[in-house]
Amino acid sequence: MSLRPTRAWHPYAMLAPTVIVLGLFFLLPLALAFHQSFHAWDLLTPPRPVGLANYRALWASGELVEIAARTLGYGVLVVSFSLSFGLGLALLLDREGRLYAFVRGAVFSAYVVSWVAVALLWLWLLDPQSGLVARAARGVGLPGVDWLGDPDLVLFTLAGVTVWKITGYAMVCFLAGLQDIPRSVLEAAALDGATPWLRFRRIVWPLLRPTAAFVGTTSLILSFQAFDVVRVMTQGGPVRASTIFVYAIYEQVFVNLRVGRASALTVVFFVMLVGLTALQLRVWQKRSNGRVET
């Protein structure tokens, strides 16, 4: 049975459902947001054109720069630690046996739990009065820390919760990459006297670079879309120290009734995310090419 298309339009017909869904639920809303970013609308009165006023207001208030810097810092923390922990766990658990299988399943189980459940769990654990972390600290004579009430700590706390949830995803991706590496190559390197660190540096890591690029990109996009964990645990506080892009867009629409300004934030957020994703992929590509050329 031949798998070649019998008509020239067959490939396009197979792509049509995906293109339609992508257009309806991604491209069309993005185009509407771009259009609304040039209007003032409070959901009660008709929209009125204001040109670039929404963008100028966001820039003049300093809110845009603060939110972008906060979101970028949060994303860097999440991507860095989820990649590191996921790779480390994959290297440790890439073995046969029921115990290793159980640990892999336990780590990955956090990823399939809903964000709301994870946020509620950590909200209870980190409660400064009755939380398990605070009780453990008092039990050993350490002062309690308000992880969610300190503006200097809250973003690190939310990043830690996000890393705890998505590390299992990174681990599974790296495990798949490790299992694609031929065992004969590693065994030959070991017979030649290569140490475990040298085998990892010269063989394993170069072959895992595409996997790392994929995990890093998807983790960056996931971290930039964080909403539930902020909404449940901090509501953007204290003093807006945990207000990142998606939550700021929510506030502009449903709290301030400024659809135009929320749309302007959406457009800036999209451009920023596309730019960072392209930059990240470009860096990984250059590193991979440099490794091959050497």
Image: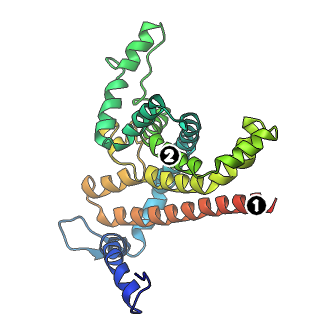
State the image coordinates of residue 17 (x, y, percent, origin top left): 31, 77
**Amino acid type, label 2:** Ala
Determine which of the numbered discs, if any, sits on residue 292 in the image. 1
Rate crowding at label 1 as few (under 14), some (14 to 19) or many (20 or more) other CA atoms within 10 Å.
few
Q: CA distance from mark 1 to mark 2?
A: 24 Å
For this orientation, the residue located farthest to the front is 1
The residue beneath circle 2 is: 170
**Amino acid type, label 1:** Val
State the image coordinates of residue 261 (x, y, percent, origin top left): 36, 63
Q: Residue at x 35, y 72 (%)?
A: 22
State the image coordinates of residue 20 (x, y, percent, origin top left): 31, 77
Q: Is residue 249 above or below residue 31?
A: above
Q: Nearer the viewer, residue 188 or 7?
A: 188
How many labels sit on residues? Answer: 2
Q: Is residue 157 left or right of residue 282?
A: left
Q: Is residue 204 left or right of residue 158?
A: right
Q: Nearer the viewer, residue 15 or 36?
A: 15
Q: Is residue 137 above or below residue 149?
A: above
State the image coordinates of residue 158 (x, y, percent, origin top left): 43, 37
Q: Is residue 27 above or below residue 118?
A: below
